[in-house]
Image (cartoon, rainbow, N blue to C red):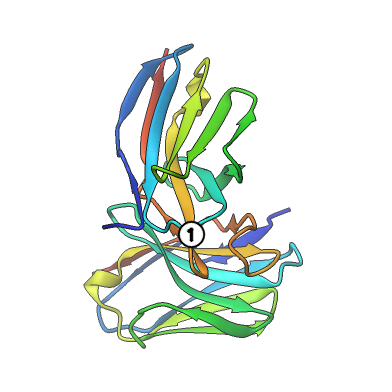
Amino acid sequence: DTAVSQTPKYLVTQMGNDKSIKCEQNLGHDTMYWYKQDSKKFLKIMFSYNNKELIINETVPNRFSPKSPDKAHLNLHINSLELGDSAVYFCASSQEGTTDNEQFFGPGTRLTVL
Amino acid sequence: RKEVEQDPGPFNVPEGATVAFNCTYSNSASQSFFWYRQDCRKEPKLLMSVYSSGNEDGRFTAQLNRASQYISLLIRDSKLSDSATYLCVAPNDYKLSFGAGTTVTVRA
């Protein structure tokens, strides 16, 4: 059973397009996250939701809009894609939104913007 | 200064060797820390947590030095399967800050 799943796994698209990435967790966790891992391998938090409520919103362009229809799902919509958006996007979840808890990551979505 | 800094490596070691590497963190208020392991083109997975001065789990030992603000990870009796990138993670206010990782390659 997959704990945290993401779709699609790979996404290749043209500059200017709009795309969405979906994430689902079946762990019963309250908190979900979106991270971006760039070519230099730094993993940076973008957003965090706790029980469908946005609790972390790092300095991310407003072309990125997360949506949490319920606490098991956190989707990421990206408008007007740019070359610099190319990266691996990881969804993660944890039992609570504190920094003491293990975070479980999805397999990642490798986004390439041409 | 980056929130978490790591020696990127790579550390190339023979099977059976001991390898150790450090990570420094900037937030002196951080209490708990983590080492995550990330295999090539895979997601990070928790290796171990570090809450007090250190923690040992089988062949892996993590040590925390609060005065100097660094965490170390030591791997004894390296296996081929230990080849991976090891991410040091420190809390920074309300979020986790990840280092860029230290790459370890264990050769036969």
**B38 lies above or below A79:** above
Q: Residues within 10 Å of mark 1 (few under 14, many from 20)?
A: few
Apparent side of residue A69 relative to residue B31 in the rendered image (left or right): right
- Tell me residue A79's x, y (percent): 36, 86
Q: If the image is split into quadrants, where does the N terminus of chain B sit?
A: bottom left
Question: Residue at 50% of width from left, 57% of height from top?
Answer: B30
Residue B76 or residue A5, whichever sits in front: B76
Q: Position of residue B17 (x, y in %)?
A: 44, 13
Q: Nearer the viewer, residue A98 or B82?
A: A98
Extreme-front residue of the structure: B67
Badge 1 marks a residue whose secondary structure is loop
**Residue B74 drawn at (x, y percent):** 48, 26
A52, above or below A88, in the image: below
Quarter of the figure with residue B101: top left
**Could you say where residue A96 lies in the image, as x and y percent from the top left?**
68, 67
Q: Within the image, what quadrant is residue A10 found in?
A: bottom left
Residue B6 lies, with reference to residue B75, above or below; the image says below
Question: Chain ID for label 1?
Answer: B
Q: Is residue B108 above or below residue B29?
A: above
Q: Residue furthest right?
A: A28
Q: State the residue in front, B16 or A88.
A: B16
At x 48%, y 54%, the residue is B90
